[in-house]
Amino acid sequence: MMRITIRPFQEVRLLARPSRILRPFSSAARTLGTAETDTSVSSSSTASSSSRIGRISESLIRPSPTPHVSATEDKTTVSWPDGRTTTFDNYFLFDHCRCPKCFHSKTKQRLKELNQIPDDIRPVAVEVDNSGVHLSWSTSEEHKSTFPFEFLRRSAYDPPLSSYRDATEGRVLWNSKIAQSPPSVVYEDIIRSDDEALKSERAILKLLNRVHDFGFCFVNNVPATPEKTQELIEKIAPIRHTHYGGFWEFTADQSHGDLAYSNEGLPCHTDTTYFTDPAGLQIFHLLSHPSPPGTGGTTLLVDGFYTASLLSTLYPTSYSLLSRLRIPAHASGTEGTMLRPPLSQPAFRHDEKGQLTQVRWNNEDRGVLGQGWSAEEVKGWYQAARRYDELNKSEDAEYWVQLGPGTMLVIDNWRVMHGRSAFTGARQMCGAYVGADDWSSRRTALTKKHEIRKKSILDDDWSVGW
Ligand SMILES: C[N+](C)(C)CCCC[C@H](N)C(=O)O
Ligand SMILES: O=C(O)CCC(=O)C(=O)O
């Protein structure tokens, strides 16, 4: 392990290749001293606090894939073997230390407060080996952090290393042709005997991965009863309770002041746009709709990410307006329920990397537009909305499927829109919502437990909090 002791204000470059010998220095704090050349690795060289004279001892080191690491008063720079360089604020690195003083390894919580980080925190020693970068800090008490290369690659922000896997990994955008081979799993893989709990979990993970990748997935061979449907849903993830209840059964009985409780057709939409946090999963199981004599009641699915990508390509200005202008939504049709989130949101929301993460699209529940908008924005929004609507209603985008007893449909309500054709006759539907964070947590936890983890994946303490 190569150990370099550095002094404040001293740029240090740790060489991954024996091409140069570091210019060692010995100096009092705060100034650069005259250099002494020392080509032997001084095993005795130890991290020095800022009060002691430090020495750089460096020698030719074997070529290795480890990066160069250099630290100055406020930044630590990592020069990767592929030639890319990323820089970290020393405050950021110290804040992300995972040593026992800074991070509770069981609760995965940060222990160090911001006011416990000295404003001028900086490394006083840098070591690099195959396990990562080891920084000794300028704190009064000895404090050392070890950063896996994987953490530094993934957390890089100056600049970001976009090669890192992100939330869109595995995502498949689809159009009406998905009808040829829609994603599905079978009930028996999930509901198993108690001694097959691990197989059941792997089947649930397969379902949730398909929901992540396609935005929906069928579960076939489900017993057509509310009880078995509820049991299955609760096995997958916790049910989210709303003003409609937890597990719900509904029919055209106007029991709620909402068109879903009628026999009207419903254009493609996402649900609960009137919640600050719209439902993550929308799950349906059509228990009964004798047809004949009943008619209609066919389910519509549209990949809102697919049509958003078309809009972005065809009408980038419209995409931008739907990504920026906030739309109030409300649910006001049921006695005692007047839902209207305090913070309206735009139709398209993106994550920190600019990836489309949520589509909120519901014409029926849309409120009064234009508050705080300009006249041009009002006009522009309607043009953009009509363009998006046209794409959603196109033959290319619409996937019509007739549900029936035995087939449960799990929808990512942040991405895939659903609707139905008008119907006649007695139609019994049941299902539930699951919170967005809840199904994401379930999928991540099952992935961690069941997927063979490539050694480059971050270990426990570093894999959380992204
Ligand atoms: C699913 N369930 C029938 C219980 C409620 C349906 C709510 C429909 C509402 N317009 C919305 O889009 O959220
Ligand atoms: O009845 C259906 O098939 C769907 C109803 C619906 O769109 C909803 O509950 O949001």
Image (cartoon, rainbow, N blue to C red):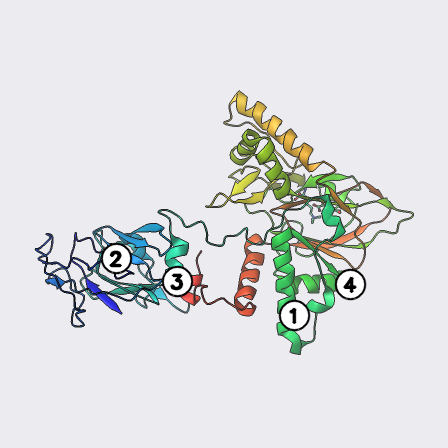
Cα separation, mark 1 vs mark 2, equals 46 Å
Q: Which mark is residue 200?
A: 1
- Residue at the spot 35% in from the left edge and 67% down from the top edge: 131
Image x and y of residue 417, in percent: 67, 44
Amino acid at pointer 3: Gln
Image x and y of residue 147, in percent: 34, 62
Give the mark nearest the N terminus, 4 or 1: 1
Read off the residue under disc 2.
116
Q: How crowded is the residue under tag 2: few (<14 C-alpha within 10 Å), some, or many (20+)?
A: few
**Residue 344 in view in this figure:** yes
Q: How crowded is the residue under tag 1: few (<14 C-alpha within 10 Å), some, or many (20+)?
A: many
Give the mark nearest the N terminus, 3 or 1: 3
Give the mark nearest the N terminus, 4 or 3: 3
Amino acid at pointer 1: Ser
- Between disc 3 and disc 1, the foreground one is 1
Read off the residue under disc 4.
221
Give the mark nearest the N terminus, 2 or 3: 3
Cα separation, mark 4 vs mark 2, equals 57 Å
